[in-house]
Amino acid sequence: MQTYDFIIVGSGSAGSVLAEKLSASGRFSVLVLEAGGSDRRFYVQMPLGYGKTFFDPGVNWNYKAEPDPGLAGNADHWPRGKLLGGSSSINAMVWIRGAREDFDAWAAAGNPGWGYDDLLPAFKALEDNQAGADAWRGTGGPLHVTDCSNAVHPLTQRYLAAGQQAGLPLNPDFNGAAQEGVGIYQISTRNGRRMSAARAFLRPAMKRGNVRVEMKALATRVLFEGKRAIGVEYQQNGETKTARAGREIILSGGSVNSPQLLQLSGVGPSALLKGLGIRMVHANENVGAHLQDHVGINYTFKGKLPTLNQTLRPWWGKLLVGMQYILTRSGPLSLSMNNAGGFFRTDPAATRPNMQLYFQAFSTVIPKSGERPILTPDPWPGFSIGLSNCRPSSRGEIMIRSANPREYPRITANAYSTNADVEEMLAAVKFVRKIASMPAMAEIIEEEVLPGPSITSDADLIQDFRKRSGTVYHPVSTCRMGPDPARAVVDPRLKAHGIDGLRVIDASIFPDNITGNTNAASIMTGWKGAELVLEDQK
């Protein structure tokens, strides 16, 4: 059995950063266990290629949530990255940090060091923002953030104008002074290629002699001596192997895999683990609980002007944009499907936005089997305005079904299970229609395709968004951080309550969800977590 200073389980958004920062001094040896394979695949590196990875079992866990009464009984598809870079290798690349108030609330809940002013230096240090450095943005860091202002589809300007006509300010930088308003999204790419956590952090670390990355290595349990974590058992190439950690084991599997591995290892809800015959190491009812996720829906319109549908659907259009991408690393394939978006309040009395907008200059009403239909849009000029809630009050859970590490856990999302979530979404979809009714958009709209003009009453609107909503892939809080062991899994230094030598460092530790896409905050958590680990080494 080999011994390393640190074992990191998961090479995703946080794990990749940890591998780089913990190995940088050369003082410590680091083993990274990744259940998936390499990120060196064309459709991973090409930004819009994530339409192809959406169901691809070669790079995607392809989880399925339980049928959800709040979603009219639908069982939601939950893609999660199963490769170097984790979900940062298959996501939509929108670079949103979250609101100042989100992180200040984390700190106020008893997590010192996690307020916005504490975290801003980390965000700036890890970024290389093409828009340039200022009081909020950083340059020179390992992760390049692209300013898409000059590359978006012309229709985007009409969306921005309509948003302003509907009363929202134009916001040049959602990661700047304030979040509210409409604007163009920055994305995590560089020179037309995806800038995953693997590309920015893990690949440079892998060149060091003190870093070992094992792929196709499924961690099956953490090994303990008493209440101290001492190693990890994993399966690779049909063999069961073990590795020992001299200093710490760090779980960075994300909001599904980290609670799953803890439960398999005997850390979790006592009744669940006893019922499955798993030997208890430490009872903690919060492991896998408190699941929060953003839920979204698209309103889709048929337009009078050409959209990306006319470019991306015909074979010759695919050929042209493919050639453009291969030769110049530019064009639609070098961008996210979300060219622009924004943040707004459903209640004017609220102090900050509670809803996020997405604008897509194409439409995918007609699905194609086996792939997310990004690369096969509708045969007519269409576009979508989407939205998702930012801080829903609904809570779910992720719990193992058996002691078999290869059996997927039970994901119970409980979407729209509170009246508050239903009421704010009802107000939000009405606001999407308001944007579409503004002159800048109304004059180029032929008709609303989904949900369609017949859906007008509150009851019908609610029924529609229950039927058509789904996760926007931002699950958090299943190993939440907090000072009280009765309510949290890890402490503010991300050490597991009641256990020595074990931390969880990924999006599962978020005490509450953030206002916006979660990838930037997950990467920041890896950065901040690495600093905490290094501070604690004697």
Image: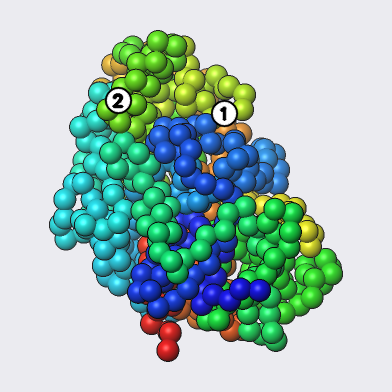
Residue 461 spot, x, y in % from top left: 53, 32
Which mark's residue is nearer the viewer, 1 or 2?
2
Instruction: Tell me which residue sits at (71%, 71%) in the image.
Output: 265
Question: Which of the 4 image quarters holds residue 341?
Answer: top left
Say which quadrant the C terminus sits in: bottom left
- Which SS class for mark 2? helix
Real-space Cα separation, disc 1 to disc 2, in angstroms: 25 Å
Labels 1 and 2: the sequence-earlier one:
2
Q: Which of 504 and 428 is in front in this view?
A: 504
Disc assigned to residue 526:
none
Q: Which residue appears at 62% of the width and 24% of the height? A: 369
Q: Which residue was labeled with disc 1?
A: 371
Q: Which mark is residue 327?
A: 2
Q: Position of residue 65 (x, y in %)?
A: 66, 46
| 423 lies left or right of 159 | right
Residue 253, quarter of the rendered image: bottom right
Residue at left 22%, top 36%?
149
SS under mark 1: loop
Say whether residue 130 is left or right of residue 460.
Answer: left
What amino acid type is highlighted by mark number 1? Answer: Glu
In this rendered view, identify the residue nearer to me: 333 or 379. Answer: 333
Residue 99 versus residue 343 in the image, above or below:
below
Q: Residue at x 33, y 43 (%)?
A: 189
